[in-house]
Image (cartoon, helix red, strand yellow):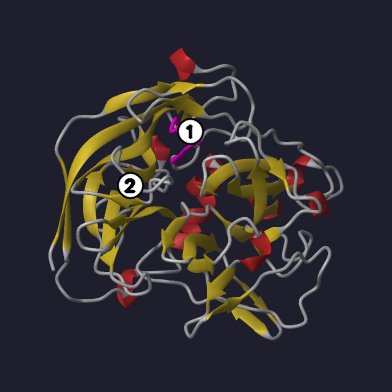
Amino acid sequence: MTRLILRTLLALASLTDAAGAASEPPFSALTLVGPPTVVFKAGRDACDGADVPDASARAFRDASSAVALYGMHYRNRALRGPSLDALKLDCAIVLDSGEKPDPALYDDRSWVAATWTDDGKAVAALLHHEYQANEHPGRCRSKVYLECWYNTVVAAASTDGGQRFSRATPPVVVAGAPFRQEVEQGRHRGFFNPSNIFGDGRWRYMFASTTGWDLKGSDQAAGVCLFRTDDPADPSRWRAWTGTGFTAAFPDPYTKPAMHLATCKPVAPFPTPVGAVVRHRGSGAWIAVFMARKAADFPESGFYWTSSRDLVTWDRPRLLLAGATLYDDPCGASAGLIAYPSLLDPAAMGRNFDDTGDTALLTYVTLRTEGCAITSDRDLVRRPLAIKVWP
């Protein structure tokens, strides 16, 4: 997933901008009020070499009120503890990656990227799945990783409070390109990096990014799309916002070729995947965090936040934490990189940590660089922040 952020999303960032954001003054303020503390250090806390934080942190409280937090590598493990303040990596693998050569199985490399549970026992999950065709002989006309990369958001579930996840059988595609992996090789394709799942009444939402496509009868713009469902336990019910309603579905092109090629309408001002969305309990406002490199609409590289009343129109992003991100050239990042932001309130009222009060924890990953290389020396860290929302 690191290479996805570093290379592909540099291209995606150039395809979307903040022009669609509301021009009014911001109605929220996020302020860091303390130094970072380390939650997980790869060189100290890992069970094996696969244990590095490599995604935005996702957490829920299980049936016993203990906390499970995900956001590691494609050999998926969880950090567990009685609270967000006391987490330790559990060496039991909750979901492994089969690295299978058949793309129709959707079991090459998978990351647990989002979770939702109503009771702390039955847990629905969204997987960021990468089919890396360059690793499978005869599956790609190129040997270059980026030119063979095919991404899909697929479903998984747990019946034991997140101790173990299994993929749906047969696989269920939540968001994917309407064509098979051999089509349009030469660039990164598909949907990827879902945000956390967050709730509003009977509905559950998430954002997912796409590089888009241009097919006869279908012109999908690159960007970040908003998805909705009334039942995360039934992954076939997710639908994406089209600009007029939540009606776009993206079925599995290996089992159900689409009669009509659906498209979703990207939501501004996100140039890259949404790290997390939470709802401010006092005001009802939505707050999203994401990372961006320096560009016309982003004066510095780093983490940004934006706010919304309706999940579709967002105000102008503001800088939360400056620093070189995975979108920046690692050759010039002597201080290392920052990546994968999330917002978690230890006092969240919801079991899935999708709400926040006037304080929260900015949770993210720091990555050490050596020359022009990004190393596996990574820390999962958090910093306290204060939140203010105006009427």
Mark 2 = which residue? 349
- The segment highlighted magenta reads 58-67
Where's residue 164, x and y in %?
65, 33
Query: The residue under label 2 is which amino acid type?
Result: Met
Q: Which mark is residue 37?
A: none
CB atoms of marks 2 and 1 within 8 Å: no
Residue at x-position 52% and y-position 41%: 120
Q: Residue furthest top?
A: 44
- Which of the two residues, 75 or 389, is positioned nearer the viewer here? 389
Compared across the picture, whether 25 is left or right of 43 comes to: left
Where's residue 286, x and y in %?
30, 62
- Mark 2 is surrounded, within 10 Å at the Cα level, by few (under 14), some (14 to 19) or many (20 or more) other residues, namely few
Of the two numbered discs 2 and 1 on the same chain, state the one appearing first in sequence.
1
- Which of the two residues, 187 or 356, is positioned nearer the viewer here? 356
Residue at x-position 42% and y-position 28%: 371
Mark 1 = which residue? 68
Q: Residue 66 magenta-drawn?
A: yes
Q: Quadrant of the N terminus?
A: top right
Compared across the picture, whether 202 is left or right of 220 comes to: left
Pair 2/1: label in front: 2
| Alpha carbon distance from label 2 to label 1 | 16 Å
Which image quarter: residue 162? top right
Query: The residue under label 1 is which amino acid type?
Result: Ala
Which image quarter: residue 86? top left
Where's residue 107, x and y in %?
75, 44
